[in-house]
Image (cartoon, rainbow, N blue to C red):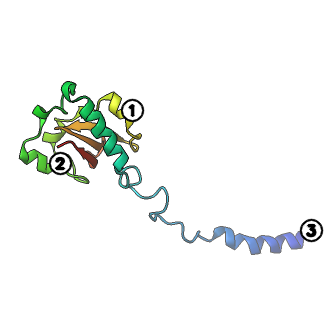
């Protein structure tokens, strides 16, 4: 290739290299949805059945937060809702989920954990305190 051909090749290719990429904005494609970490996660019927089975096997020796005496007052119970943010009163009532039950449940999404609040298993985002899903035992 002679010097003159290289010059023209550079002129033809250079504009394409300087053009902005089309369709690569900050859309909601893979990796751009801020709810990918927990927004689409939900306990399955199998997860709920597993938790219910575990709960009824351990009814006599339930850890704090899961025993019947640990039920929430009606006002706080109403504040415990999927996609709702836990108010400080409910954040104080969060207890670790029993390790044996955590082992039976699927791994939580990033930044989330299985917790116990007033007799319920609650999947909560540790950073935002948003409730991702709930397993009720009543």
Residue at image x 35%, y 34%? 102
Query: At which x and y percent is residue 97?
Result: 28, 33
Quarter of the image for residue 50 reads top left
Q: Is residue 14 visible?
A: yes
| Closer mark to the observer between disc 2 and disc 1 | 1
Q: Which residue is mark 2?
A: 80
Task: Indicate which disc, 3 or 2, sits on the residue closer to the N terminus.
Answer: 3
C-alpha distance separating marks 3 and 1: 66 Å
Residue at image x 40%, y 49%? 37
Q: Quadrant of the N terminus?
A: bottom right
Mark 2–mark 1 contact, CB under 8 Å? Answer: no
**Numbered tag placed on residue 1 in the rendering:** 3
Q: Image check: 129 left or right of 75?
A: right
Q: Image check: 25 left or right of 83?
A: right
| Closer mark to the observer between disc 3 and disc 1 | 1
Query: At which x and y percent is residue 65?
Result: 18, 32
C-alpha distance separating marks 2 and 1: 24 Å
**Numbered tag placed on residue 103 in the rendering:** 1
Q: Is residue 96 visible?
A: no
């Amino acid at each position: 290739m002679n010097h003159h051909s290289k010059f023209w090749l550079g002129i033809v290719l250079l504009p394409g290299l300087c053009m902005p990429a089309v369709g690569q904005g900050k859309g909601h494609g893979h990796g751009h949805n801020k709810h990918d970490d927990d927004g689409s996660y939900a306990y399955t019927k199998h997860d709920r059945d597993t938790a219910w089975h575990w709960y009824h096997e351990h009814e006599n020796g339930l850890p704090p937060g899961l025993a019947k005496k640990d039920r929430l007052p009606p006002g706080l119970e109403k504040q415990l809702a999927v996609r709702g943010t836990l108010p400080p009163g409910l954040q104080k009532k969060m207890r670790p989920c029993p390790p044996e039950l955590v082992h039976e449940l699927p791994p939580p999404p990033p930044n989330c954990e299985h917790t116990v609040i007033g007799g319920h298993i609650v999947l909560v985002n540790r950073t935002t305190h948003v409730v991702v899903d709930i397993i009720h035992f009543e």
